[in-house]
Image (cartoon, rainbow, N blue to C red):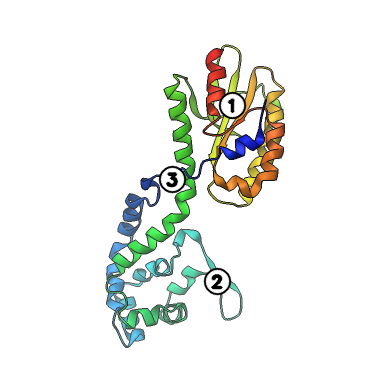
Amino acid sequence: MKDFNLFMSQLSETNATLDSFTDFEKVSRNVAKISIKLNQLNYLLGKTDLRSAVSDLFEENPKTFEALDILVAVRSSDNKKVLNDKYEPVLVQSYFTDIDSICKFVEETGLAEVFSSKKITNLVDYVFGVEVGLDTNARKNRGGDIMASAVAKKFEDAGLEYRREVNSTEFPEITALGADLKRFDFVISTDNKTYLIEANYYNSRGSKLNETARSYSDIAPKINQYSQYEFVWITDGQGWHSAKNNLEEAYSIIPRVYNLTSIVEFIREIKRG
């Protein structure tokens, strides 16, 4: 008998590990890509006549200023836009094409005061810190990777064979899924049935949780109508307390919903055949 209250009480407090906080290798790679430009921008530090310094540097190498955006924690690849004086949206990078625009960017972002006051002594070191901060946005993805690894280990410890990241195109008979490509985190096949498994972990609240619950509530019946297939959802994390109602509805619709504690029930059933 499924017990939703028990399921909720079993949700783990965290799945974070010490190596999940920051990917320092990625941070170092990102800094290394622009380190030459950053070292050239160091020329601006401590200058009282900033416009003159910008002009000298621009004449020497105008491409140097392409690295200015990361100093305000914006990556060029983000194609970030801001409003100009006419309240028109323009790309941040559009400010790096001439001396006047560069000076405007430096003044209005507050970098001018930071440069002249010598609060920063080395922009390479400064950007390393910026990249560490930006990398915190990737923690959610690493949390998902940790969850997948935890599930995989439980399967392996139980001696279960599984496949990872399997596309729905491998199951053309499941026509109810339509033309949308779906990739399942795990697939376990037995003599009687193939289990299509999704695994995720949510530490914090957000609209993503409700979207996930609704999506799986829709997908599960479509798959389960085929006797040789069954959808399985393994999820965990304290974030679900903020989306309890949606999770409870999904829990009532999807026969197989497990967390990292109750997953042993699924494993035990599969091993029994």
Q: Residues within 10 Å of mark 2 (few under 14, many from 20)?
A: few
Residue drawn where x is 29% and y is 62% of the image: 35
Front one among 43 and 255: 255
Dot 1 or dot 2: first in sequence order is: 2
Real-space CA distance between mark 3 and mark 1, rounded to the nearest whole angstrom: 26 Å
Mark 2 or 3: in front is: 3
Q: Residue at x 56, y 77 (%)?
A: 84
- For the point 56% across and 23% down, the residue is 266
Foreground disc of the pair 1, 2: 1
3 or 42, which is in the foreground? 3
Q: Earlier in the sequence, mark 2 or mark 3?
A: 3
Residue 15, above or below 38: above
Residue tagged by mark 1?
A: 196
Residue for badge 3: 16
Looking at the image, is mark 3 or mark 1 nearer the viewer?
3
Measured Cα–Cα span from mark 2 to mark 3: 35 Å
The image position of residue 166, as x and y in percent, is 53, 29
Residue 161 located left or right of residue 273 = left
Tag 2: residue type? Val
Amino acid beneath label 3: Ala
Quadrant housing residue 237? top right
Label 3 CA crowd tier, 10 Å (few <14, some 14–19, many 20+) = some
Q: Secondary structure at mark 2?
A: strand
- Where disc 1 sits, the SS reads strand
Please identify the quarter of the rendering in which residue 173 is found: top right
In the image, residue 59 lies at what x, y percent?
Answer: 32, 77
Label total for image:
3
Q: Is residue 202 left or right of residue 116?
A: right
* Mark number, residue 82: 2
Give residue 150's mark. none
